[in-house]
Image: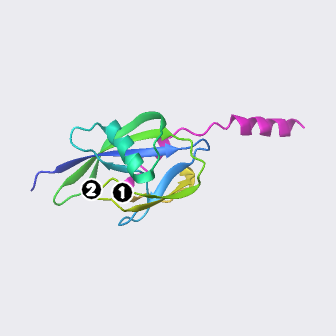
Amino acid sequence: MADPTYVQKACAYITRGSGELLVFEGPEHDGLQIPKGTLEPGESPREALFREVIEESGLGTLNATRHLSTDVWTRRHSPPKWYVRHFFHATVYEPRDRWTHTVTDGGDEHGAEFELYWIHPSTAREFALDLDDYVQLLPLPDRAGERNAELAAASD
């Protein structure tokens, strides 16, 4: 049996104020995806996260970025190939509901177009490559304003 190949990946759960999660449907995979990519030599997972988010979405400013989890995911059994996936959560202010971003970095994905949009994580269908494994770790949006309105209406 061949020695397994380990590929380091940085994966980004990006949410905006309403709690919606940024996704796209990528070529060659069935299901939703999140911005993600392979670490370059000498690059930390956090550095790769910021680079991949810019490359695949065009978003240049992330807020409150934090590491959620790292796992080893089996990409294939023969020959063995495993992804060491580093999942991060970041928030962003983004008023656009949908947009197309074209990769211009000159790399393998140069010219690729990503159709990005927001979903509510609880209503999402299955993600490609099991990228939804840690969605449940995302914080729920602050719903204090909604609760206060409900309480006020109930007291009328």
User: Is residue 148 within the magenta segment?
Assistant: yes
Relative to 19, is 76 on the left or the right? Answer: left
Q: Identify residue for label 2.
A: 75
- Residue 154 image position (x, y, % from top left): 84, 39
The image's mark for residue 82 is none
Residue stretch in magenta: 129-156
Quarter of the image for residue 17 reads: top right
| Image point (38%, 56%), residue name | 103
Percent position of residue 126, x then y: 46, 59
Decide which of tag 2 and tag 1 comes sooner along the chain.
2
Q: Position of residue 41 (x, y in %)?
A: 21, 42
Q: Which residue is mark 1?
A: 129
Three-letter code, disc 1: Leu
Which picture quadrant has residue 76?
A: bottom left
Residue 134 shows up from this direction: no
Counting other residues with Cα less than 10 Å from the Cα at mark 2, is it few (<14), some (14-19), or many (20 or more)? some
